[in-house]
Amino acid sequence: MSNRIFLNDKIVKDTEGLLSTLDRGFLYGDGLFETLRTYGKTPFRLEDHVARLSNSAQYFNIPFHYTSQQIRQIIEHLLTENNLKDAYIRMTLSRGLGFNGLIPTGTCVPTFVIHTKPFAVYPVSLYKTGVLLITSHIRRSATCPISCHKTLNFLTNYLIKRKASEKGAHDALILNTDNHIAECAVSNIFVVEKNTVITPSLKANVLPGITRKIVLELCKENGIHASEELFGLEKVFGASEVFITNALMEIMPVSKIDGYAVGKLVPGTITKLLHDKYKSLKI
C-alpha cells in the first residue's frame, strides 16, 4: 500500500515521487532536513522547526518560500490521506537541480519533500531505566560551519551512531576539537550539577535543538537554574543526572556512560520533573 507524500507543491503517491538524478541533494548532500512528531494530529512546535529550516536555508542560500501555516495545512492533508494520528514527520529541502559542478550557475529550482509515517514509540521502560551512552573517538570540528545546521551531510553522525549501536549503547557523546562536550549523534545533552541544569553552549558548535530550547524554557518557567557552558568530560562523569533530548524521544534519562553509572537515581528528580512538564505541554 503506497503512502502519500508532498513533493514540490503536489501531494503524490510515494511510488510516484520522482527526483532528478542531477538533484544536488543526491549529488552533494546539498540540503537540509527536519524531523518532528505529531500528537493527536497536531505537529509539535512546528513553527520552531520551520524557522530553523528557513534560517539554515537562508544561510546556505537555498530558496525556501513555505510558511509555517502552509506547511501545517500540508501536514494535515497528509495525515488525513495516510490515516495517521501520532506520526513521524520529515521535511527535506534540497537545492535541487543544478549544473556545472559544485558551484551551480543560474538559478536552482529547490526540491521540497514532506513525508509522514506512523510514529514508533520509544519503550516506556527506557524512561524508567535510562539509556546507555559511549564516548565517540570521532571529534567534532569546533569551526566547521555546517555542524550547527541540520544538513543532509549526515555520514559522520551515521558512523558515530553505528558504533554506539555495535557496543549496545543508544547514542554516543561527541567532544569537539577543543575538548569540549558538543552533543550526541542524534541528540543534545544536559547534565545536572547541584540542582543546576547545564547544556553545552552553542559555541561548542552544536545543533540548536528544538527540544533543547524547550528544556531551557521549562527550567526558567519552573525556577530551575539553567546555563549554557563550555565544559569537558569530567563534568559529565561528575553529574548527579544526565539526560539527552530530541523531538522524537523528548527527554531521555541516561543511566551509564562508557559503562560508568550516572548519579544515584535514574531518572533523576530534575530529569523526571522536566519530562513531566514537557509532556504537559502537549495536552
Image: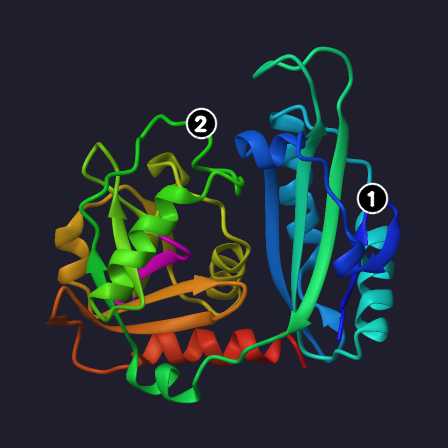
Name which residue lies at 26% across and 61% down.
Answer: 164
Task: Locate the N terminus and report the quarter of the image it occupies.
Answer: bottom right
In the rendered view, does 187 fall on the left or right side of 268? right
Q: Where does the image place residue 250, in percent across and percent down from the top left? A: 49, 70
Going from N to C along the chain, the mark reached first, 2 or 1, is 1
Amino acid on which disc 1 is placed: Asn
Name the image quarter holding residue 36.
bottom right
Query: Is residue 136 positioned above or below 282 on the image?
Result: above
Amino acid on which disc 2 is placed: Pro
Res 157 visible: yes
The foreground one among 260 and 5 is 5
Secondary structure at numbered mark 2: loop
Question: In this rendering, which labeled residue sits more in front, label 2 or label 1?
Answer: 1
Between the C-alphas of marks 2 and 1, the distance is: 28 Å
Q: Where does the image place residue 86, in percent across and percent down from the top left? A: 68, 78
Query: Is residue 271 positioned above or below 207 on the image?
Result: below
Query: Is residue 133 positioned above or below 253 on the image?
Result: above
Name which residue lies at 12% across and 70% down.
Answer: 259
Q: Which residue is mark 1?
A: 8
Task: Locate the C terminus and report the quarter of the image it occupies.
Answer: bottom right
Q: Where does the image place residue 271, in percent across and percent down from the top left? A: 37, 74
Q: Which mark is residue 145?
A: 2
Q: Look at the image and say whether residue 250 sits in the magenta stretch.
A: no
Number of marks drawn = 2
Res 192 visible: no
Query: Is residue 153 positioned above or below 215 on the image?
Result: above
Name which residue lies at 21% across and 50% down.
Answer: 136
Secondary structure at numbered mark 1: loop
The foreground one among 26 and 191 is 26
The foreground one among 264 and 169 is 169
Q: Where does the image place residue 131, in percent across and percent down from the top left? A: 29, 74
**Magenta range:** 185-195
